[in-house]
Image: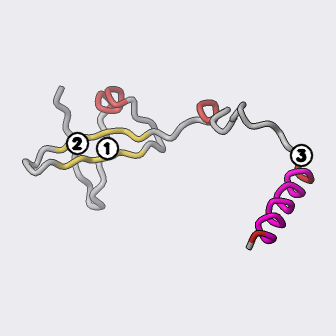
Amino acid sequence: MQQMSKITGKYQITLPQKVREALNAHIGDNLVFNVQESGEVSLKVMRRPTVAELYGALHRPQLAYVPYEEARRLAQDEKSARDRIT
């Protein structure tokens, strides 16, 4: 597929619809241009993940929940133990 786009006075281009669809590009996505020594250019879309896709990304079931006050006490105890060693 070959598509054409014109460079504006601000060096901007509009991605033709068929190119947007082929790349699955959407508003807010970043485009990465890879320029080869031969002058060939490839284009990839770096999509921003949606909130739904990020949901649970930080969930680490192997870590048990520790209430704030207990975590603070444990951290202070560990610091005290390190201070005694040095």
Between 70 and 22, the one lying in front of the other is 70
Marks 2 & 1, CB-CB < 8 Å contact: yes
Task: Say which residue label 1 marks.
Answer: 14
Q: Secondary structure at mark 3?
A: loop
Q: Secondary structure at mark 2?
A: loop
What's under tag 2, amino acid-wise? Ser
**Is 14 drawn above or below residue 53 in the view shown?**
below
What's under tag 1, amino acid-wise? Thr
Q: Classify mark 2: residues with Cα within 10 Å, few (<14), some (14-19) or many (20+).
A: few
What span is colored magenta in the figure? 70-84
**In the image, residue 75 lies in the stretch drawn in magenta:** yes
**Is 38 drawn above or below residue 81 in the view shown?**
above
**Which mark is first along the chain, 3 or 2?**
2
In the displayed image of the protein, which residue is found farthest to the bottom?
Answer: 86
Task: Say which residue label 3 marks.
Answer: 67
Q: Secondary structure at mark 1?
A: loop
Q: Quadrant of the C terminus?
A: bottom right
The main secondary structure of the magenta stretch is helix
Residue at 89% over, 46% down: 67
Number of the front mark, 1 or 3 = 3
**Is 83 drawn above or below residue 42 in the view shown?**
below
Residue at 7% over, 48% down: 38
The residues bearing labels 1 and 3 have C-alpha atoms spaced at a distance of 52 Å
Query: Is residue 40 shown left or right of residue 26?
Result: left
What's under tag 3, amino acid-wise? Pro
**Which mark is first along the chain, 3 or 1?**
1
**In the image, residue 22 lies in the stretch drawn in magenta:** no
In the displayed image of the protein, which residue is found farthest to the left?
Answer: 38
